[in-house]
Amino acid sequence: MEIIPAIDIRGGKCVRLYQGDYGQQTTFADNPVEVALQWKSQGARWLHVVDLDGAAVGEPRNAAVVERIIDRSLLLVELGGGIRKKEVAEELLHRGVSRIVLGTAAIEKPELVEKLNRRFGQAVVVGLDARDGKIAIHGWRKDTVVDVLVLASEMMRIGVKRFIYTDVRRDGTLTEPNFDAIGKLRDRLDVPVIASGGIARLEHLQRLGELGVEGAIIGKALYTGDINLREAIARFGG
């Protein structure tokens, strides 16, 4: 299971939100590049980066910071937040982003997801951001009536090969992942699923591994010290 540290960027800084609420922000570092280098020194191979400003306005706002992270750390970066146009996706991949994460576009522009998937294949990931089982979009600030499993099935039909599932109500809470929902996704899908939201203890990683997820994204628990990244990778990575 790939252990993937998260960096959420807002205003050029490394922050964490509580349940995706832009009004409940904690700033952990002024320089996301230094944070990326810290996670690399502890054994990370991948980095999950969210451009929170981009998610809110509909187009990336911190691409220059992300590019510096890639250039300095040489980590593999998956990036989400405001990627809703073909030319934006192409530019980010050209700049060295290894995977783009499409969330809002999967609801509002499924034809774009299909085109990008045909061209870039494994570099395209769909983010299943769920609040009470329904997809949330526009930086999690807008709810929909679309069921997570329905969207996942539709995206698989057009060829999507990987998903990131995030339970919005668990994200940033240091409670526990939504194991039930993750298990249902794994039962339904025959492509890799990466889990995110609420991971706070090593025991959570063990259970996620037993569910068969490809990766686990850890955010707040790394910044608070509840999980040691080096230990997590040593026990569950690979």
Image (spheres, grey):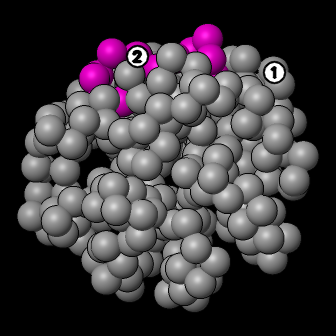
Magenta-drawn stretch contains 174: yes
Q: Residue 61 carries which label?
A: none
Q: Residue at x 39, y 71 (%)?
A: 60
Q: Where is residue 174 in the image (x, y as percent from the top left)?
A: 29, 22
Q: Position of residue 126 (x, y in %)?
A: 65, 50
Choose between 11 and 108: the one closer to the eye.
Answer: 108
Question: Is residue 66 shown left or right of residue 113?
Answer: left
Relative to 104, say whether 45 is above or below: below
Q: Residue 154 is drawn in which quadrant?
A: top right
Q: Which mark is residue 176?
A: 2
First reached walking from the N terminus: tag 2 or tag 1: 2
Choose between 207 and 60: the one closer to the eye.
Answer: 60
Q: Mark 1 points at which residue?
A: 187
Q: Can residue 68 be seen in this view?
A: no
Q: Which residue is drawn at 55% across and 66% down?
A: 84
Choose between 138 and 48: the one closer to the eye.
Answer: 138
Magenta-drawn stretch contains 87: no
Amino acid, disc 2: Glu
- Cβ–Cβ below 8 Å for labels 2 and 1? no
Mark 1 crowd level (few <14, some 14–19, many ≥20, 10 Å Cα):
few
Q: Which residue is drawn at 19% across and 50% down?
A: 15
Relative to 8, say whether 36 is above or below: below
Q: What range is drawn magenta here? A: 170-182
Amino acid, disc 1: Asp
